[in-house]
Every structure is written in structure tokens, then in C-alpha cells.
Amino acid sequence: AQKVTQAQTEISVVEKEDVTLDCVYETRDTTYYLFWYKQPPSGELVFLIRRNSFDEQNEISGRYSWNFQKSTSSFNFTITASQVVDSAVYFCALSGSGNTGKLIFGQGTTLQVKP
Amino acid sequence: DAGVTQSPTHLIKTRGQQVTLRCSPKSGHDTVSWYQQALGQGPQFIFQYYEEEERQRGNFPDRFSGHQFPNYSSELNVNALLLGDSALYLCASSLGSNSGPQPQHFGDGTRLSIL
């Protein structure tokens, strides 16, 4: 069975602090894909990143960075120098082998960035 | 370039009724997936349509059905509505690919309330 666990339900930080959102996944597939999505209050899920299981290089995009560690089945997301606009619910998701792209989502982490 | 559009935005129904939700995919996308998101939870995969056929289905009863039209737009139908069907229904579109699941682009969702 495939499963995604985001143990942090809510995180509150003060603007300019760094924050890391944890994601742990379970799958028996050897080929799989991991995603992060952001859901602001408007409801639309915004795609942030896709990573396949063969690419363990960490990735940085502006203030965002992702740490993929296959050995611990984790795909953590760090926001550096957080801003109030980063406040949202963040979802980690898993898609197994095959091209259908069915996403298995975690429960989400609500991030509140206070000014 | 229009993104994924869903209609209606909000809908109120009573138990036992039937509902149809509509989705137009992002321009150039040929695959449509539907998700149900209960309050405070991650989205749950309902099914996916590609080339006007249901390609994969999640763990939802037959009361949930769908359709994809030649222009790639899609409908989600739910019969015999239950109180537990109250949720945000998200439509996502993507481009079919042989190089793994592509990022899905989500609409703003339809908020369905059952009284």
C-alpha cells in the first residue's frame, strides 16, 4: 500500500524564520514520483515540485528547497526567510509507477507565518 | 492561457439528490482527474479520465461516476447524495506522457454541501 505521512499538523513561525515541513512516504514501487503542492485559502492547489525516485539530488528554487532521502523515505521541504504570503496548507503527495499520475496525498501541514 | 476551470463554485443539495460538477482542463491538457477533499484532510483520488475513458479509479462507490468529452472537458456525477459527500471537489488536468506522471494543475474546486 502507498501512504504519505505529514506528522506536523500546524506550524507557526515569525516572518524571516526558516521552516521545514516533513514528509515521509511508503511505497513498494521502485519507480515513483513525489510532489509538493501549496493550497492557499482560495482552495486551488498550486504545484511546487516533482521529483522521481532515481533523482536524489536536492533542489533549490529561490527561498524553497527540497531534501529527498531515499534511505529514510523522506522528502522534506524548507522555506528560507519565510514571508506572510507563505501562509497556506502544504501537501506532500506520492504517485507510483505507471503514467496515470494518481496522487496519494498526506494530511497536509498548515503553515502560519506571522508578521 | 486559462487554467483549470470548475463550475459551479458552490452547491447546496439535500440527501438523496443527484449532482453534476463540471471541469474544463488547462489548454493543451488531455487528462482529467477528480479528487474529494474533506475539511482538514488531504485530497482523495476519485478517478481519472483519458481519451474519454476512465483509466483509474480510487476507493469510491459506484454512486460516483464521470465522463470525459471529446474536447477533454469532464463531468463528475454523484447519485443518492449522503451527508458524508459534503466536501470540496477538485478537478486536475495534466498532459498524458510516457515519461512518468506529469504535474497536475488544479482548479479552485466546487464546494458541495449536503443538508
Image (cartoon, coloured by chain):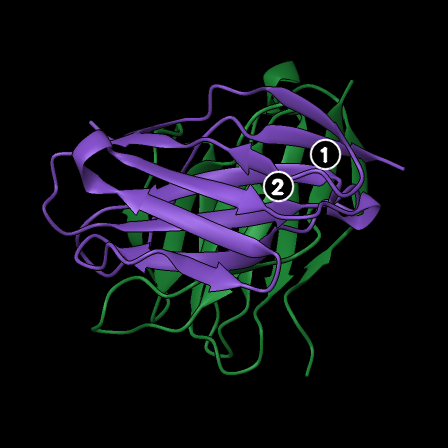
Query: Label 2 crowding class (10 Å Cα cut-off): few <14, some 14-19, many 20+?
Result: many
Query: Residue A40 in the image: x percent, y percent?
Result: 73, 45
Taking the image as drawn, is residue B104 in sight? no
Front in this rendered view, residue A16 or A34:
A16
Question: In the figure, is residue B3 to the left or right of B14?
Answer: left
Front in this rendered view, residue B61 or A46:
A46
Taking the image as drawn, is residue B93 in sight? yes
What residue is at 28 percent from the left and 49 percent from the top?
A: B56
Query: In the figure, what tint was chain B given?
Result: green
Mark 2 — residue? B89
Query: In the figure, what tint was chain A given?
Result: purple
Secondary structure under badge 1?
Answer: strand
Give the chain of mark 2. Answer: B
Q: Are marks 1 and 2 in contact (CB under 8 Å)?
A: yes
Question: In the figure, is residue A22 to the left or right of A20?
Answer: left
Give above or below for B54 relative to B80.
Answer: below
